[in-house]
Amino acid sequence: MNRLHPRVRRLWAAQALLLAAVVAVAVFVAGRVVFDGRIPAGTPLAVFAVLALAGVVHAALRYRVWRYEIRDDAIYLERGVVTRVRTVVPFVRIQHVDSSRGPIERVVGLASVVVYTAGSRGADVTVPGLAPDGADDLRERLKRLAIRAEGEDAV
């Protein structure tokens, strides 16, 4: 099984810290506007600390669990901290494959691969936290395997 790039932990932790800061600001504003200052002054800081700690721990645990593997017939993914999710995407079901690098991913030097499958709406999977060259290689490999599987599955 392949692991994600270790820098993805920093990305996920930074996202968790940003979310914690947004929620803490919302608690501060709600305390001033909605509750007319009746919320203790340290509450936003406490909210930030709890959410930040939980988010950073979750990022580390998420990294430890996340795995993917390319086998002869499909791509296998394993992820999830609280609920463990194992996904199998047969190559014959792959419609197309994209590699992407959002602005935050570009800053930390990472990329993702999105595998779109035939099936119900939202039937796509993402492999995050890859080095850009690794994402391009994975995209091309999956594309070749999907094309080969399509030929084998033809009637």
Image (tube, rainbow, N blue to C red):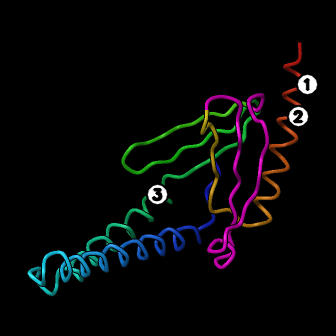
Gap in angstroms between the C-alphas marked 2 and 3: 32 Å
Amino acid tagged 2: Ile
- Circle 1 sits in a helix, a strand or a loop, which is it? helix
Which structural element holds mark 2? helix
How packed is label 3: few (under 14 Cα within 10 Å), some, or many (20 or more)? some
Residue 151, disc: 1
Q: Is residue 152 left or right of residue 90?
A: right
Residue 129: percent from left, percent from top = 63, 62
Q: N-terminal of the two: label 1 or label 3?
A: 3
Residue 64 is inside the magenta segment: no
Instruction: Work out whether 69 lies above or below 48.
Output: above
**Left or right, residue 149 beside residue 62:** right
Residue 1 in percent (x, y) is at: 63, 47
Q: Is residue 3 above or below residue 44?
A: above
In front: label 2 or label 3: 2
Q: Position of residue 137 (x, y in %)?
A: 82, 56
Q: Quarter-wise, where is residue 105 in the image? A: bottom right
Vertical placement of residue 4 versus 146, above or below: below
- The answer to which of marks 2 and 3 sits earlier in the sequence is 3
Q: Which residues are magenta?
A: 91-120
Query: Mark 1 to mark 2: distance in Å?
Result: 6 Å
